[in-house]
Image: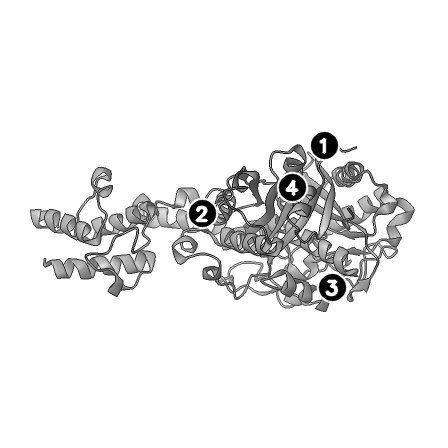
Amino acid sequence: MSKQHILAEFAEIVREIVGIPVAEVQPEAHLRDDLDIDSLSLVEIMVAVEDRFGVATPDEIAADLETVDAVLNHIEQHASAGVA
Amino acid sequence: MRPYGRRVVITGMGAITPVGLSVQDFWDSLLAGRSGVGPIEAFDASNLPVKIAGEVKGFDPTAYMPRTVSRRIDKYAQFAVAAAAQAVEHAKLVIDEANTHRVGVLIGSGYGPTGLVQSGTLTLEGRGYRGLAPWLSAATSIDCAAGEVAYKLQATGPSGAISTACASGTSAVGEAMRMIQRGDVDAMIAGGADNSVTSFDIGSTAMSRALSTRNDDPQRASRPFDKGRDGFVMAAGAGALVLEDARSAERRGAPILAEVVGYGATSDAYHPTAPHPEGLGARRAMQLALDDAGLPASAVDHINAHGTSTTLNDRTEAAAIRKVFGDHAPRIPITAVKSMTGHTIGAAGAVELVATVQTLLTGVVPPTINCDDPEDPDLNFVPHQPQRHDVAVAMSNSFGFAGHNATLVVRRYEQ
């Protein structure tokens, strides 16, 4: 799965859950400062990510995810490990 | 007599109702005798015995809060945030570092976020717990509205919910008054909110035989104190008021709308839904509020009645007013705004206090519409048309399921 593809899927999840336009979900965007995604919304998003990509996100990892790019890397790493 | 020295005044008001999304629109509708009751649009009610309600229409939460907030709170809390924001703006109250810890929030609710509880339960059944949003546990608490209002206004004094069924809004204002009198805080944002127009609430309340089934004639379904009444009409909304210590309000040059002078609260301890047949709790709540105000019954110029349009409430309330006010009762204009708004449950007391204060300010008593054949023909239920009266002292009653009774007395403010 290409990173571009993961980004498109992730942006769609973010749009569905918090209503942020797909175009604003760019790799360099900061989840909290740029996209207004608070900690509880992030939990909600990561549950959807798990359902979509089969990538679980333990709390200690979720706490370190600050940007869209960090989320994409996390998904890419674990999805390519064959979980999805 | 008053156990505490501080006087408490109202400096701002806000309202989200089925007949208007601001105090002015709400008030204009009441004076025009406009009903906010219609066929239920929020969900498919075709399988329910009751298909009408007083819904809040045209409300845009994003006018009051970002979508990141509105998406994760129930409508009842959205209504509360909106009403509270209106009230604080009206009061020109600036909450900043200097006073934040002296400002508190009490938002009453009878049922709270029932819509979210219902949809969450269905999700749990259908998709399991992973379908539940992580914010749901906070958003399904009955104090969620108070928390959101405190957050929105950055008020860091005490906050919470008072839940006394249909008396919740009145209880919240009364308890907020006490907190200011005691000196706990200098200002409170107090009121009530509910959005019980859900299939669960309509279904269960219909089963308790409390709702009107006049589905084919919604505008005439809510008819307090009329002999042809057949139950109340469920409605949604919120009311909020800014209460302040009179001296701090004067110091900051706030617009003072009225003084809250009396509060009385009692319980019937009699039945889950029916009032005490002799209205003992209602009578005692009214008397306690008068005693608290240090006023005789003869001083009261107007009563904003609970007036739900159920057979039992209205008969009991009229008889209780007779008992408390004696010979003076027929001289008092008694209005039931639920004839137009429907019954907004935990919001009702706050919304009706807004109307009561408007009456003090304008000398106009809103009508009780649909009161064609009054329960007690000698009492003045202000049928059909508003009336002008010189009102210096007014009483607002709220009597809830489970026998919760609360009464407030307000008066024109004089320094």
Q: Residue at x 38, y 45 (%)?
A: B135
Q: Do labels 2 and 3 share a chain?
A: yes
Q: Which amino acid does label 3 sit on?
A: Ile
Q: Do labels 4 and 3 share a chain?
A: yes
Disc 3 secondary structure class: loop
Picture quarter containing residue B339?
bottom right
Identify residue for label 1: B4
Q: Do labels 1 and 3 share a chain?
A: yes
Q: Residue B171 carries which label?
A: 4
| Neighbours of disc 2 within 10 Å: few (<14), some (14-19), many (20+) | some
Disc 2 secondary structure class: helix
| Neighbours of disc 1 within 10 Å: few (<14), some (14-19), many (20+) | few
Dot 1 or dot 4: first in sequence order is: 1
Dot 4 or dot 3: first in sequence order is: 4
Q: Residue furthest top?
A: B3
Disc 1 secondary structure class: loop
Q: Along the line of sight, which residue is nearer the eye, B91 or A81?
A: B91
